[in-house]
Amino acid sequence: MSLQTPHPRYRPYQGAAAGWGALRGVAHAWLDSKQPFKNLRALLKTNQHGGFDCPGCAWGDSPEDGRVKFCENGAKAVNWEASGRRVDAAFFARHTVSQLREQSDYWLEYQGRLTEPMRYDAASDRYLPIGWDDAFALIAQHLHALESPDQAEFYTSGRTSNEAAFLYQLFVRSLGSNNFPDCSNMCHEASSVALGRAVGVGKGSVTFADFAEADAIFVLGQNPGTNHPRMLDPLREAVARGAQVVCCNPLRERGLERFQHPQHALEMLGNGSAPLNTAYFRPHLGGDLAMLRGIAKCLLAWERQAQAGGGPAVFDHAFLAAHSIGLDDYLQAVDASDWGQLVEQSGLTREEIDQAARIYRNAERVIICWAMGITQHVHSVAIIEEIVNLQLLRGNIGKPGAGLCPVRGHSNVQGDRTMGINDRPPAALLDALERRFGVAMPRAPGHNTVEAIEAMLAGRSRVFIGLGGNFAQATPDSARSHQALRNCALTVQISTKLNRSHLTHGREALILPCLGRTDIDRQAGGPQAVTVEDTFSMIHASYGQLEPCSPLQRSEPSIVAGIAAATLGRQPLGSRPVDWLALVEDYARIRELIADCIPGFENFNQRLQHPGGFYLGNPAARREWRTSSGRAQFSANPLPASLLDPRAGNGAAPDLILQTLRSHDQYNTTIYGLDDRYRGVRGQREVLFVNAEDIRRLGFEPGQRVDIETLWNDGVERRVCGFTLLAYDVPPGQAAAYYPETNPLVPLQSHGRESFTPTSKSIAVRLRAHVADARIA
Ligand SMILES: Nc1nc2c(c(=O)[nH]1)N[C@H]1C(S)=C(S)[C@@H](COP(=O)(O)OP(=O)(O)OC[C@H]3O[C@@H](n4cnc5c(=O)[nH]c(N)nc54)[C@H](O)[C@@H]3O)O[C@H]1N2
Ligand SMILES: Nc1nc2c(c(=O)[nH]1)N[C@H]1C(S)=C(S)[C@@H](COP(=O)(O)OP(=O)(O)OC[C@H]3O[C@@H](n4cnc5c(=O)[nH]c(N)nc54)[C@H](O)[C@@H]3O)O[C@H]1N2
Ligand SMILES: [Mo]
């Protein structure tokens, strides 16, 4: 357990990414779990056939390969879930909720696994035990008391299995609502919107195998060394066979620069670590649209030269003619984007853009990967449409070794959307559900995360149910999202570990403890598997390996079924009734329903038996375009007038533009420790990364403590206090700090156009000296 120190210790990291530091990280997480021997056996089953899917990230693996498949941060996730510590009734008897609220997020989760259902008791300000049936009855009573089912919010976090997610959406839609705020709204929603419109499917078009065939891989706005460590493997292999890996990131992320394979012991003993990138560009926050447009402008110029001089074409004309629409309008937009603006907005020089364009042109097959550095801006949908535009010009979609790769976060966030966790469900899904169950499904759009917070704040929604996650801390504008939860008549959190969402509750509140991915899930029909979908649309089964730490924990599907049965009765649905409780006796029964309703899941139970699972397929990867025009669509977006929302800054020039990101020692709101190894920070998370010149320009000194305030036009004060200024290699005008500590700074209304994703990577801020000032010793 790393201890909080009053001042952060900073020493630049000299080692490679992964390597010995990673091995130490694994050993520490493992020993700290309090049940190392049990967990070692579990670890070896991570991502193996017959084992469980790693509850870490959504990166996929080669289905054929039998190697050890866990990484440092996957091992942390497993050991964190499989903790030997317990948060039981005795724990809650010792602490009032007000006392628990004083503790850090780190401390709360560190206390261990939740073991039995608890109900908040206002008189004693404590959580007291409650039986499962009474808990379900309380939820049913609150849901029945609503005038409309749209007065409740049904949140999902992306660890939820396909089986639980399918039952959950069926239950909520049977009640009559599409209110499905989910973590995806804060994550890859812009990818879903942009890809859905441009190529017909809101998912990536590549599979794991494509990485071995790519000539160039662009990695935009992503820190895989920390957040998708298994992705470094194919990247390194690509460099080794002479392919180009091009990184675009304002920060020099260690994991993108140099890398040692943690599973190759011999390499680790040597000192050599392979350079991973072959080119590294550092754009402005939100500058990627201008950079990509600049690359397209170079390609267009070369294409015109080729046409004039009879050289080989730069564009893939056969592909463009057969598959695309909107090229002329797009090329006009490219012509209209002038170099002065492209250079200024991208933060790159004309020469750098030119270099990126040459790499792009020289590659026959290009994969573009991206994550939160791309999706959490105001104009994220336009950035991702520009990724598609670029790929279309050279036919880089739907051929081996090329394509679109939004790298998903949570291990089943993509599967949850496939199962219908969607506030704007496609009509085809609702039609299929109606056909299968003979009951009318709600057609009006439901609430996404931002709209759910607004509805609870305004008192329009009065019940909140969270299927996993940590709504209070993951959402923007913490003061307002906390108030939103407190406004509710009932908040219910289905969770594995204690977090702030349990302590920021409605007038009545329930904590329902559930099994995690690593736990053996026994139902009447025997031990059950659940299924998940990775970022490459591979569906596979996950079997828990560890004995649950309490007989009172229940699985997510059985909790959802319990709520549904209590609310709707045992046989609720239209002409083809569903017996919720019978369904969870054997999850194969749930999968039969999924097979009946969700395209691509025919013979689900049989196909699941295949080692490594099965590929759901993606029409765009076959060059079938399920768009409004039946073709892949160019988008002719003008460059944004500003990289920020016009309301940001509120007329004043911001001191800095802040991005909020993850340290190496956290999983979203779950804080494993207070160190960020690759960035060289130890013992503290309340640090602000700024370059030394900006620190001086603003009249401060490195090591000084500051308060950070948001500039936004609604007159509301948003501030976090006492952050230590760390002189760091950040481009001028930018700053970085950790999520979730800085979530109070993100205005609820500051979200992506069309995506509603909070702009967690571009917040206009001003710094003030912290009153009780102190310096790094
Ligand atoms: N260990 C671990 N694994 C995780 C998670 C975790 O918290 N811990 N979280 C999971 C989840 S849910 C997700 S969504 C993913 C998140 O994975 P990432 O997207 O890698 O997560 P962030 O830490 O938000 O990193 C964003 C990166 O984008 C860069 N960036 C920021 N703004 C811009 C920009 O405008 N342009 C460019 N080009 N780059 C920019 C930042 O410098 C940073 O390197 O990871 C998943 N995996
Ligand atoms: N400022 C800022 N805010 C952000 C982001 C950012 O980059 N910057 N990133 C956004 C992104 S990409 C995401 S995905 C969201 C994440 O938002 P969430 O998914 O809501 O948050 P997590 O921190 O992943 O949730 C952690 C909690 O989930 C519970 N849990 C863990 N495993 C299980 C399980 O198997 N079942 C159940 N039922 N519960 C479980 C535990 O109780 C744990 O406390 O945050 C978003 N918020
Ligand atoms: Mo995410």
Image: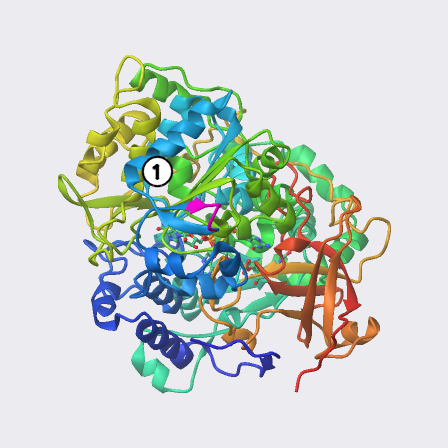
**Horizontally, is 154 left or right of 541 in the view?**
right
Q: Quadrant of the C terminus?
A: bottom right
- The magenta region covers 120-124
The residue at the point 21 percent across, 72 percent down is: 37
Q: Residue furthest right?
A: 651
- Which of the pair 275/661 is nearer the observer? 661
Specify whether residue 333 is in view: yes
Position in image of residue 523 (x %, y %): 17, 42
Name which quarter of the figure residue 95 lies in.
Answer: bottom left
The residue at the point 44 percent across, 52 percent down is: 126
SS of the residue at dot 1?
A: helix
Q: Is residue 228 above or below residue 557?
A: below
Residue 42 colored in magenta in the image: no
Q: Is residue 178 above or below residue 128?
A: above
Position in image of residue 593 (x %, y %): 26, 28
Q: Residues within 10 Å of mark 1 (few under 14, many from 20)?
A: many
The residue at the point 73 percent across, 50 percent down is: 643
Q: How many marks?
A: 1
Q: Amino acid at mark 1?
A: Ala
Residue 122 colored in magenta in the image: yes
- Dominant SS in magenta: loop
Q: Residue furthest front?
A: 123
- Which of the pair 543/240 is nearer the observer? 543
Residue wearing tag 1: 135
**Horizontally, is 614 left or right of 732 in the view?**
left
- Which of the pair 148/342 is nearer the observer? 148
Position in image of residue 76 (x %, y %): 37, 66
The residue at the point 38 percent across, 22 percent down is: 174
